């Protein structure tokens, strides 16, 4: 059922479509993986973390130069996010002597998940949506096998969500605004159905993070409500961009990050929950 939860693995779901940036993201994963494989060698661990900090700064500088070259409209906020991530790493290395071995691993896990994976899936993807024209956006907007979790019902429902959203972009000679409104309402209704099915499944398998996952579902629904309310104010081109951004960034992030925890939990159901969390973080 899906990939094993035993090591930090780069996944194609993290690709954003820029060769150099994707290559540098992969390198960050390699450096992080090397750190987590170091055992009982404090100096080697410290050197490996310093190497991660150095490469992170190098990558951020390249990424910021690229954003300047395309005149990315949210550059200042993105630079601030980079600065915060570097500050966290610097604080960590300055205080590493005060941490136990277990603390070091926990802090690194958090850094990898919240400051590498989440940053790629949420913030970096926005940059590469910004640079694409309508035709390119349509081409990238599709279900990918790498999103599959290995649970038939959930995967089929995820695929249907993409199918409905894609249908909203195919209007040809139809009443465009009427077609869009009808299809988005269909998407909204099916999203509610899917989330209820997924929550029932999590109850059935006694998934320990059910309540937190339900809150995430509620936030996605709130985002869709906001999107629907603003439909009438959007031009057709703006609508397409907003819909693809919503699906490709927020929903894909939820699938490949949060829903992945469910399948990983099943693979390690006999373990303690703490062991499960460690195995999950190592899998992403």
Image (cartoon, helix red, strand yellow):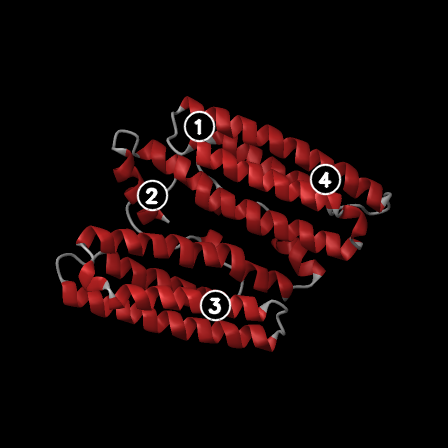
Q: Residue at 64% of width from left, 55% of height from top?
A: 139
To which quarter of the image does residue 130 belong?
Answer: bottom right
Residue 95, quarter of picture: bottom left
Indicate which disc residue 184 carries: 4
Residue shown at the point (51%, 48%) measured from the top left: 253
- Left or right position of 174 against 229: right
Question: What is the CA distance from the residue labelled 3 to the residue labelled 1?
Answer: 36 Å
Residue 104: % across, % down: 24, 56
Which residue sits furthest left? 40
Q: Is residue 162 above or below residue 45?
A: above
Counting from the top left corner in percent of width and height, residue 260 is at 42, 41
**The quadrant where residue 265 appears:** top left
Q: CA distance from mark 2 to mark 4?
A: 34 Å
Comparing 105 with 164, the one in front is 105
Residue annotated with mark 2: 280
Q: Do we see residue 87 in this rendering?
A: yes
Which residue is at a point 43% across and 31% down the rendered structure image? Answer: 210
How many marks are shown on the rendered structure?
Answer: 4
Q: Which numbered tag is attached to residue 21?
A: 3
Could you say whether the residue bearing mark 4 is in a helix, strand or loop?
helix
Give the residue at mark 1: 202
Q: Does label 4 or label 3 sit earlier along the sequence?
A: 3
SS category of the residue bearing label 1: helix
């Amino acid at each position: 059922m899906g990939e094993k939860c035993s090591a930090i693995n780069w996944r194609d779901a993290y690709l954003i479509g820029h060769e150099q940036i994707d290559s540098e993201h992969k390198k960050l994963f390699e450096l992080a993986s090397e750190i987590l494989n170091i055992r009982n060698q404090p100096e080697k661990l410290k050197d490996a973390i310093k190497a991660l900090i150095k490469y992170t700064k190098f990558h951020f500088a390249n990424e910021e130069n690229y954003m300047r070259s395309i005149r990315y409209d949210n550059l200042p906020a993105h630079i601030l996010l980079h600065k915060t991530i570097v500050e966290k790493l610097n604080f960590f290395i300055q205080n590493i002597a005060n941490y136990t071995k277990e603390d070091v691993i926990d802090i690194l896990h958090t850094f990898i998940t919240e400051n590498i994976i989440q940053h790629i899936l949420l913030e970096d993807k926005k940059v590469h949506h910004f640079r694409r024209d309508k035709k390119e956006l349509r081409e990238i907007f599709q279900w990918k096998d790498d999103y599959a979790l290995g649970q038939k019902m959930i995967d089929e429902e995820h695929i249907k969500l993409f199918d409905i959203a894609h249908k909203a972009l195919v209007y040809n000679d139809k009443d465009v605004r009427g077609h869009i409104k009808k299809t988005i309402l269909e998407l909204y209704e099916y999203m509610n159905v899917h989330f209820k099915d997924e929550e029932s499944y999590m109850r059935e398998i006694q998934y320990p993070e059910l309540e937190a996952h339900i809150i995430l579902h509620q936030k996605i629904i709130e985002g869709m409500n906001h999107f629907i309310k603003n439909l009438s104010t959007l031009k057709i081109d703006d609508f397409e961009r907003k819909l693809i951004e919503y699906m490709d960034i927020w929903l894909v992030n939820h699938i490949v990050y949060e829903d992945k925890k469910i399948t990983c939990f099943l693979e390690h159901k006999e373990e303690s929950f703490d062991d499960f969390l460690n195995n999950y973080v190592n899998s992403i």
